[in-house]
């Protein structure tokens, strides 16, 4: 097959969606070398000229094309350069004029939680999804929950939606950088960790309310925010809350390995990778019982109602005082997290593309 991959994600900051794309592309690259079924495929990663993220590939050709950037490059130039083959899009977006293509759409948040996004952002994505419903041969998504959400909000044909899940990728190879622990004067096993963007659907207000109820417990919140997309959210200044901002993978691994526990009160997730990463690195997780999270985390975590502050306070206190429970969560968390890798979804994506 002559396969083109939309490489616009290399121009964007690495959040969950872009990280997924990086991992899928790198795994496809390995399959092209190791699996006889795909070794004759010719795969090209088409990118704009303003890429800011590096990716190391052996079999996939990286090609910079066009003069435009962003959505204009994706809609106007990408379909021209991908006209002689099938196009794989991994980050929710795809050119609406391309017929022979596959698209990964991670969730339906723009409809389920519209107030988390600007009007322009919502309008464009809703229009784009309308066209992709007809233009795409298949839609890939990352959970059964997201599959049903895409059908519910955008009337995607359930028979065209393929669940691929996400997984633990290159972060597993990182040596932890404990300098971040020293830099913020954190004490091993004494702080509660949260990781995500400060987006209303992530429900960080609950973490701040919990912190208010637990003044002697340190909370660390890692992650960036995109003010161009997400509406502003007032963040209280609490002495026991430290915002460490965007962190490297090595720093993130260090935080996972040294935290008392990980909290994830999100209201809406297509998959929810941070709890899986936390479990993988031995950090007991307390998570919301909403959206895809129970489907993904199963019985390896403690669940809380997203906005009931007393529930979160109780579970954090439980982990801090019950070593047997903490040990069981670590063991079960590792077992569940080991099920999630990128080999299975990458194979399924290639298989579906070949079948079509």
Image (cartoon, rainbow, N blue to C red):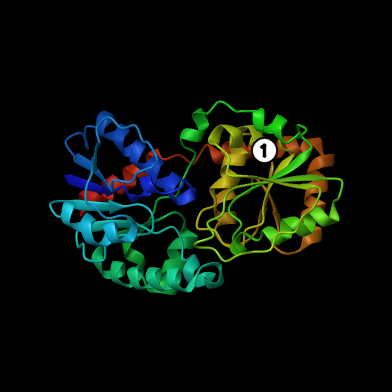
Going by the image, does 22 lie left or right of 94?
right
Q: Is residue 67 visible?
A: yes
The residue positioned 58% from the left and 55% from the top of the image is 293
Farthest right residue in view: 216
The residue positioned 66% from the left and 57% from the top of the image is 265
Q: Is residue 82 visible?
A: no
Vertical relation: 183 (above or below) 73: above
Q: Nearer the viewer, residue 239 or 298?
A: 239
Residue 126 placement (x, y as % from top left): 39, 72
Vertical relation: 271 (above or below) 167: below
Farthest left residue in view: 84
Q: Nearer the viewer, residue 315 or 171?
A: 171
The residue positioned 40% from the left and 50% from the top of the image is 164
The quadrant in which residue 27 appears is top left
The residue pinned by badge 1 equals 283
Label 1 neighbourhood size at 10 Å, few (<14), some (14-19), many (20+)? many
**Quadrant assignment for the C terminus:** bottom left
The quadrant in which residue 133 appears is bottom left
Going by the image, does 112 lie left or right of 343?
right
Residue 346 placement (x, y as % from top left): 35, 43
**Quadrant assignment for the N terminus:** top left
Residue 83 placement (x, y as % from top left): 15, 55
């Amino acid at each position: 097959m002559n396969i083109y991959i939309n490489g616009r994600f290399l121009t964007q900051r690495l959040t969950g969606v872009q990280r997924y794309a990086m991992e899928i592309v790198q795994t496809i690259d390995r399959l092209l070398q190791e699996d006889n079924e795909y070794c004759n495929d010719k795969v090209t990663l088409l990118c704009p000229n303003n890429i800011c993220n590096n990716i190391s590939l052996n079999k996939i050709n990286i090609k910079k094309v066009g003069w435009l950037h962003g959505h204009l490059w994706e809609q106007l130039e990408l379909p021209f350069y991908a006209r002689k083959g099938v196009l794989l899009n991994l980050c929710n977006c795809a050119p609406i004029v391309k017929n022979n293509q596959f698209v990964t759409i991670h969730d339906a948040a723009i409809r389920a939680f519209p107030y988390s996004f600007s009007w322009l952002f919502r309008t464009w994505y809703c229009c784009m999804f309308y066209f992709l419903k007809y233009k795409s041969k298949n839609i890939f998504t990352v959970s059964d929950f997201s599959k049903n959400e895409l059908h519910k909000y955008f009337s995607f044909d359930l028979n065209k939606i393929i669940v691929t899940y996400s997984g633990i990728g290159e972060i597993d190879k990182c040596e932890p950088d404990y300098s971040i622990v020293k830099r913020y004067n954190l004490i091993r096993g004494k702080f509660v960790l949260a990781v995500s963007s400060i987006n209303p659907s992530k429900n960080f207000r609950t973490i701040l309310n919990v912190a208010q109820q637990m003044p002697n417990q340190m909370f660390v919140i890692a992650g960036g925010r995109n003010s161009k997309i997400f509406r502003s959210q007032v963040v209280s200044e609490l002495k026991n809350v430290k915002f460490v901002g965007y962190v490297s993978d090595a720093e993130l691994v260090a935080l996972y390995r040294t935290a008392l526990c990980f909290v994830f009160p999100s209201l809406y997730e297509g998959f929810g990778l941070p709890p899986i990463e936390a479990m993988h690195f031995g950090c007991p997780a307390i998570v919301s019982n909403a959206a895809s999270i129970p489907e993904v985390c199963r019985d390896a975590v403690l669940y809380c109602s997203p906005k009931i502050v007393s529930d979160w306070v109780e579970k954090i206190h439980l982990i801090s005082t019950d070593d047997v429970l903490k040990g069981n969560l670590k063991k079960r968390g590792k077992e569940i997290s080991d099920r999630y890798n990128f080999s299975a979804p990458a194979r399924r994506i290639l298989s579906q593309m070949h079948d079509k």
